[in-house]
Image (cartoon, helix red, strand yellow):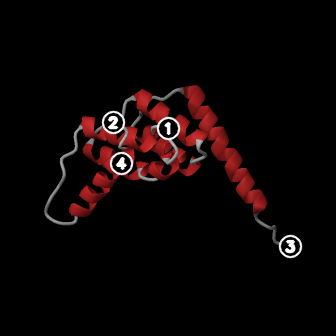
């Protein structure tokens, strides 16, 4: 991951998830989760595609009782806002609230505003019934 092989690291994660269906269970550590979060969110051209894996990573972290660092959550949230991945930003906010993970309040408010604005635009696009 640290050498820039973000997509490859996430593919290994997906392969491990597939192998979970058999008797083999991967062992995740806080370090492996940290690297997966970095791989999912570090800024580059394919980050929107990689961010799609974030909800599954957070689900596994929650299940194993591993919490991301506040700075990591803040960085991921900022990346979600930048690339307009607002459903994923909402999932991150939900996760942080569920596990009582502190986050940068200004950033959280910015995300909540972007999510609310997007919801308003989506409802405005629907034709009204008469």
Q: Please determine whether, in this image, residue 74 is positioned above or below residue 120.
A: above
N-term mark: 2 or 1: 2
The N terminus - image quarter? top left
Residue on which the image places disc 3: 130
Q: Which residue reaches farthest bottom?
A: 130
Distance CA(mark 3)–CA(mark 4): 44 Å
N-term mark: 1 or 3: 1
Distance CA(mark 1)–CA(mark 3): 45 Å
Distance CA(mark 1)–CA(mark 4): 18 Å
Residue 18, horizontal then vertical, whole percent: 26, 63
Few, some or many residues within 10 Å of mark 2 (<14, 14–19, 20+) = few
Circles 2 and 4: CB atoms closer than 8 Å: no
Q: Secondary structure at mark 3?
A: loop
Q: Secondary structure at mark 2?
A: loop
Q: Please determine whether, in this image, residue 7 is positioned above or below residue 68.
A: below
Residue on which the image places disc 4: 57
Residue 76, horizontal then vertical, whole percent: 48, 37
Distance CA(mark 2)–CA(mark 4): 20 Å
Circles 2 and 3: CB atoms closer than 8 Å: no
- Name the residue located 47 percent from the left edge and 43 percent from the top edge: 92
Q: Mark 1 against mark 4, which lies toward the viewer?
A: 1
Query: Between residues 8 and 126, which one lies in front from this camera angle?
Result: 8
Q: Secondary structure at mark 4?
A: helix
Residue 8, horizontal then vertical, whole percent: 33, 50
């Amino acid at each position: 991951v640290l050498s820039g092989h973000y997509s490859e690291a996430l593919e290994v994660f997906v392969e491990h998830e597939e192998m979970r269906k058999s008797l083999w269970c991967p062992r995740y550590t806080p370090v492996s989760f940290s690297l997966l979060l970095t791989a999912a969110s570090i800024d580059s051209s394919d980050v929107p595609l990689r961010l799609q894996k974030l909800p599954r990573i957070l689900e596994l972290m929650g299940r194993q009782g591993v919490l991301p660092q506040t700075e990591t959550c803040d960085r991921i949230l900022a990346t979600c806002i930048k690339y307009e991945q607002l459903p994923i930003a909402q999932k991150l906010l939900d996760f942080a609230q569920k596990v009582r993970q502190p986050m940068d309040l200004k950033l959280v408010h910015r995300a909540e505003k972007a999510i609310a604005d997007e919801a308003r635009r989506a409802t405005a696009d629907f034709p009204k019934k008469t």
